[in-house]
Amino acid sequence: MPDISPAPKQVVEGLLGRLLEQTRSLDHGEILELLTAFQEQLSGEIDQIGHFSDRRDQLLSEIGGCRNYVRLGELHRELNELEMEEFLKVQSVTTLHHNCTEYRDLLAGRALALVEEELLIAGTGVPPVPYAFLSTGSDGRDEQTLITDQDHLIVYGDDGGEEADDWFKEFSLLLVDRLEEIGFKKCTGDMMPSNPTWRGSFQQWRRRLICIVRYECDPDDFGKNMMNLIVLSDARYVVGNRELADQLVETIRGVEQDYFQALWGMAKAATEMKLALGFLKRLWTEGSGDHKGEFNLKLLAWAPLIMNVRILAINQGIPATNTIRRIELLQQEKSFSATAAAGLIEAYEVLTRHRILLQIRVIKGIQKDSYYLNPYELPADEREKIRQALLRIEELQKTIHTNFSIM
């Protein structure tokens, strides 16, 4: 988990300073009463966070030895509920990302092991060559949230021939079903190893990537292939053969940097993504229809931020996939000033916090989808934070537009 928070000592000193400011007009007895109340409240918060941590550790410890898909699904639901409860208490985006990514990696790893056993018992045998299981999307960026789907791929060794292709086809088809059973929804875009596009030997993957960046694939599939390349930019090792995974990730980054025209196309798409900004830079919302007075937080705010930060990171050869870490590293190599980096990190946290809150409303049955937000149901200061986030993304788009000489 990237270190993005101020040092604990700085936080404590700041909070204590603000607390003491409130005591200047109080007498001795009132000061004592205030500090005692603060101490009691703080003690209760510590106890509750400790309870969350203890319960999480207990559930995580059960995953490794679990041999039942039903129980794995129950553990997944319990961990999701625990994260939702803690998020409503502290609203830490970073903590939720870290925890969700951690337990879903463990769940996916356990599912892979059980599927291997199933195939062995069925007479299909063991994996004929080494392989690795990688994640993409939010999972690849260590940015898992309360609602997740399967954005995974498989790469395996080159010396297995058709036998390996057949084995991993059967393995992938069963794995995708088993992951769905334990709470990983199937990807609506079919970005799963059950789709042959998302599995293959290392050389098959390499040829696939070269085909995309050289524009040698079917021109009718250009948009789809570019989207696949964008998704692959966030690939992250989960379990299996680490060396194979690292080779594939390095190859993905290498071809993106070596073939500037492909990166330029990705940059053009990023700078053209629409934002929920209207006349005089006010928040734009739907004027009619089912979502009148709302806007799509994912498509018109959050996704453009992720996409544009990704483009700069790829262009600068930054290996990190996590959005905040990418911003930090871009600041270190002078692509961003400290002020711009802090603003983009704040934008990410504000937009993601509201995405998570929307997911909670869906989970609780309050609304049907987790994308649309009515900004006018929020306090004015929170609405302004969202507007400022969009203005920062707009500036980022302008920077990339200039850097890539996009006309």
Image (tube, rainbow, N blue to C red):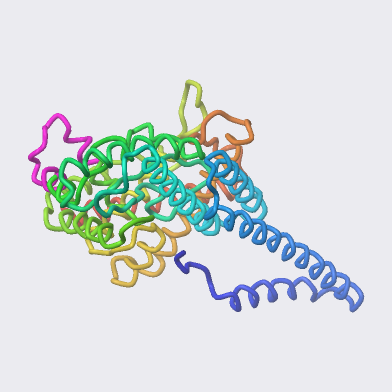
Whether residue 407 is visible here, answered yes or no, is no
| Furthest-top residue in this view | 289
Up/down of 348 relative to 15, above or below: above
Q: Which of 404 and 137 is in front in this view?
A: 137
Q: Residue at x 26, y 61 (%)?
A: 246
Of helix, strand and loop, which mostly describes the magenta segment? helix
Up/down of 168 relative to 335, above or below: above
- Rendered location of residue 203, percent (x, y): 14, 50
Q: Which residue is drawn at 56% across and 45% down?
A: 76
Q: Nearer the viewer, residue 138 or 162?
A: 162
- Rendered location of residue 275, percent (x, y): 38, 41
Q: In which quarter of the image is residue 317?
A: bottom left
Q: Which of 347 and 288 is in front in this view?
A: 347
Q: Please state if 250 lies on the left or on the right of 392 as rendered.
A: left
| Furthest-right residue in this view | 29
Q: What stretch is highlighted in magenta?
A: 208-227
- Rendered location of residue 90, percent (x, y): 64, 56
Q: Which of 52 and 338 is in front in this view?
A: 52
For the image, the number of numbered tags is 0
* Residue 265: in magenta span: no
Q: Please state if 313 lies on the left or on the right of 280 as rendered.
A: left
